[in-house]
Image (tube, grey):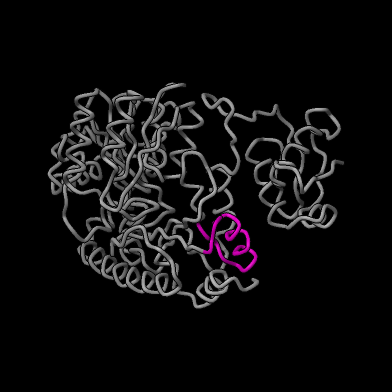
Amino acid sequence: MFTLDPQNTTPLVMQIVEGFRDLIESGALRPGAKAPSIRQFAHAHGVSVYTVVDAYDRLVAQGFFVSRPHSGFFVRRREVRTNLPGQPGTNYNFDSMWYLRRVFENRKLRMKPGCGWLPGEWLFEEGLRRSLRSLASEPVDLGGYGEPKGFLPLRQLVRDLLAEQEIVLGADQVLLTNGSSQAMDMVARRMVQPGDAVLVDEPGYPNLLFSLRFLGARLIGVPRTPSGYDLAALEELVLVHRPKVFFTQPRLQSPTGSVAHLAHLHRVVQLAERYQFMVVENDIYADLDPDPRPSLASLDQLQRVVYISSFSKTISPNLRVGYVAAHPDVLEDLAQLKMISGLTSSEFSERLVYGALIDGRWRKHLRGLRERLAQAHQRVADRLEGLGFELFAEPKAGMFLWAQHPRIANATELAYQAAEQDILLGPGHLFSTDLAPTPWMRFNVAFSADDDLWDFLRRATAGVPI
């Protein structure tokens, strides 16, 4: 097949990737051909299983291989594209979309400290059951598609909820979507053209980063700090790249958990006005924040800010109900995109969420959830620091802690080892603009209580074989 040279300056992972790529492009490996199993290749070439896993994942991400559950890896039957539009020469290895698919395929792993959702028992299950019973007793039009902008009573309720955050708007400025991911994708397609410079949080939200890469955007990472942004770097990036839009998550940001201070929000709005770029504020964790605080949208009143949020994180991820609030001109374009891509959103889901939100126990549920998360934050932070981890920030709210350990150079390799122990970790390179290896990892505090997880991390940080 091909040989590997451990003395070569090219890493073994890249030698494997390039070897298979040459075989496929030369026709020696034809579409549909099965690749050697990971363990078979590792044994035959005297390399670690983790090296082969990394190489095969890169080949999948680059479009050379396809993974079939319980069958193995096969040469993909389509035209190979090693680079995405607008990313010439990019070493596009383990991409976000491949990661997301792996996450959802492995939801049944016993321990999921790297996931991005809350445990089912932490959600508003009782409120949903009451809403479902109420909805079942009402006549529902099953023959139509629903309103293009979404269920009007829920849009009116969103208007009222945003008014509590001092964002003044009408219900016609609210567009309901299939979760926040659809909202961000539609906004990206409305605002971004191939080659456009786009600012994003660094590190940031994997699904958004993949969507922007797919559109051909030039991703410009704005470094996060525990208090928000590196403002000097932000201003320099704006001056050099003249971005079209800045996608950001000021509050309880994923993956760092950081919260941007008010002065940082003011500066972002000032720069957007001065240099004429739009800002897309992803505020999906607002309901998890125990402290009332301003948002970019409240400072700007939707002149240059597009506001995105969701009920999926606190009511149910399966219902996929999110929304966009924006200036009327922008919102009408987004409504057209929604109709083009999927007609309307599910009125049944929107009615179900609406019933849960007007339940008298909804706000009590949120208070209890915030307290539970605060307690989990304290426990997980103490245990991480006890093992020698460095914490990026300690928000004591939201779902995430961002941490690194001096003895862990590459969190990706640790994540592969963890998967063999029934543990799903969140390695940091998945949240970066360049997908470079990093020691940083995201921990979901709601899924980090299992003693077996801490035993695994203890052995990993002590250098004990796993």
**Picture coordinates of residue 160, whole percent (x, y):** 16, 46
For the question of whether residue 144 can be seen, the reply is: no
Q: Residue at x 41, y 23 (%)?
A: 196
**Magenta part of the chain:** 407-426
Quarter of the figure that contains the C terminus: bottom right
Q: Residue at x 37, y 54 (%)?
A: 256
Left or right: 411, with 23 as reference point: left
Q: Residue at x 21, y 62 (%)?
A: 363
Q: Is residue 263 above or below residue 80?
A: below
For the question of whether residue 325 can be seen, the reply is: yes
Q: Residue at x 59, y 36 (%)?
A: 92
**Picture coordinates of residue 242, whole percent (x, y):** 32, 23
Q: Nearer the viewer, residue 13 or 99?
A: 13
Q: Tell me where residue 288 sits by quadrant.
A: bottom left
Q: Nearer the viewer, residue 126 or 4?
A: 4
Q: Is residue 13 magenta?
A: no
Q: How many marks?
A: 0
Left or right: 356, with 181 as reference point: left
Q: Is residue 424 magenta?
A: yes
